[in-house]
Image: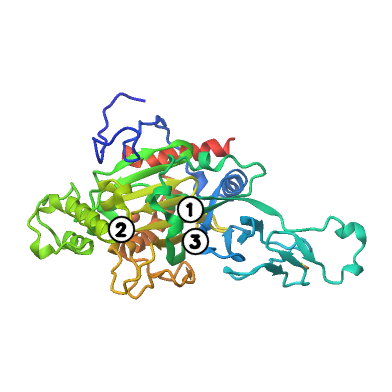
Amino acid sequence: MNSKMIPVAVINPDAPVESLEAKQPPIDNGAEIYGKDGYFSAEQMQREWNKVWTQSWLIAGVSSDIPKLGDYFLFRVRSESIIVTRTQEGIKAFYNVCPHRGARLLIEERGNKKVFVCPFHSWSFRNSGELRTITDEETFQEPVICHRPGLTPVACEEHAGLVFVSMADTPSPLKEAVGLPEGYLENYRIDQMRVVRHVRSEWGSNWKVGVEAFYESYHLHAVHPETRGVMGDLNVQYDCYPNGASRMIVPLGQPSPRQADQTTVNEGLQYMLQEAGVDPAGFTGTAADVRSAIQQAKRERSERLGLGYERFTDGQLSDSWATGIFPNVQIGCHPEAIFLMRFIPHDTDPERFWYDTMTLMFPVDDPNYCPPAWMGLPEGTNVTGSVRPETESFLIDEDPGLGLVLSQDAAFLPSVQEGMRSKAFKGQLWGEQEQRLRHFHVELERRLHA
Ligand code: FES
Ligand SMILES: [Fe+2]
């Protein structure tokens, strides 16, 4: 490493070193420029399949989606489909494949079944995985079925309300693989939240281009100029954790330092104040006071409604803690909700991926409750948690209605994918605002060469 002093933003210089908010000690990931072939080739796609997707813990879904015995959901990554189901012995996962002739057992993405009946010849299985009946069993020779073929299990564990699965024969310990400090995700109580929106859309780039775009705030001023009034994009704290995990704390409720006007309480800031319950018309502070006013208002709301925000720092109340788990997840963590995004490789095309997003929030009884704008929920979204919405699915040319910022990304990334293909482009040149990208790639390389 060279000795040049690179400025780093720290959200709260007074945060105790052992706190979750503290700036993590820097990790020396070097300054190597990585080759670009990994974004286009079928061979790389296969290598990633063999070394990453079938060897890592992956977030298959959330445990609040299967609260009752027999509830299940399917998790698909490339050509594998995995059943995640709640059994007498807790949550279990199985390959969604019948041992008889290989038919998919379940087609519906979610449901409740204590017995899975194969649609091909009606063999049946308990949701614990064991074989229940073989149709016309007497017509089979004993050696063919004497092992009583059941469903093939997939390693499955819950952590902080998230359900992880691993296709590895001997998966590493989950908590170690997640890489985040104890209590980091648990603090958000995701297990008590409910999915209020689930959108899956097909995007025109390699999945890593997706991860990269969401792992930095460096592009906000250019691709999302409308965020300038309300996001401190240069004050972002970037932290790297073990095993490829990382996070960025993006301060919200403050103008970008790139903007000259640091005093006017602009329209965006007024809107954020209003959301937090502060009347912007009566607000006497400047733009510099908005973030702390929001924190204050949320504390008061919590005291009034018993929301237990004592467990959060001031910064957590206002800011986005965008948290990455290797290989393909970013969770936007907020006190009232989380935004879980997964970048899932396409079945066959290395230049496409599935952007799968779930918005989870604590169920709200008040029908007049207005969810914060960052959540991008369409008007009329049911936030009571009483109904699990269907997954909205969109192919590449359809508009998934994800809101302005995400559609800007969806529209922009294919041009990055195409530009990287050019003979002129040699490899990405990351700055320290992109340290999470480097951290991700160091881990990816480590896995690919393991
Ligand atoms: S393939 Fe399932 S019963 Fe035949
Ligand atoms: Fe973006």
The dot on residue 207 is 1
**Which residue sits at x=77%, y=72%?**
122
The quarter of the displayed image where residue 397 is located: bottom left
> Which of the two discs, 2 and 1, labels the residue nearer the N terminus?
1
Q: Of the residues tagged 2 and 3, which is closer to the observer? A: 2
Q: In which quarter of the image is ligand 1?
A: bottom right
**Which residue sits at x=26%, y=28%?**
5
44 above or below 136?
above
Where disc 2 sits, the SS reads loop
* Closer to the camera in the image, 133 or 255: 133
Where disc 3 sits, the SS reads helix
Mark 2 = which residue?
Answer: 306
Q: Which amino acid does label 3 sit on?
A: Ser
Question: Horizontal and vertical percent for residue 256?
Answer: 20, 50
Q: Of the residues tagged 2 and 1, which is closer to the observer? A: 2
Mark 3 = which residue?
Answer: 64
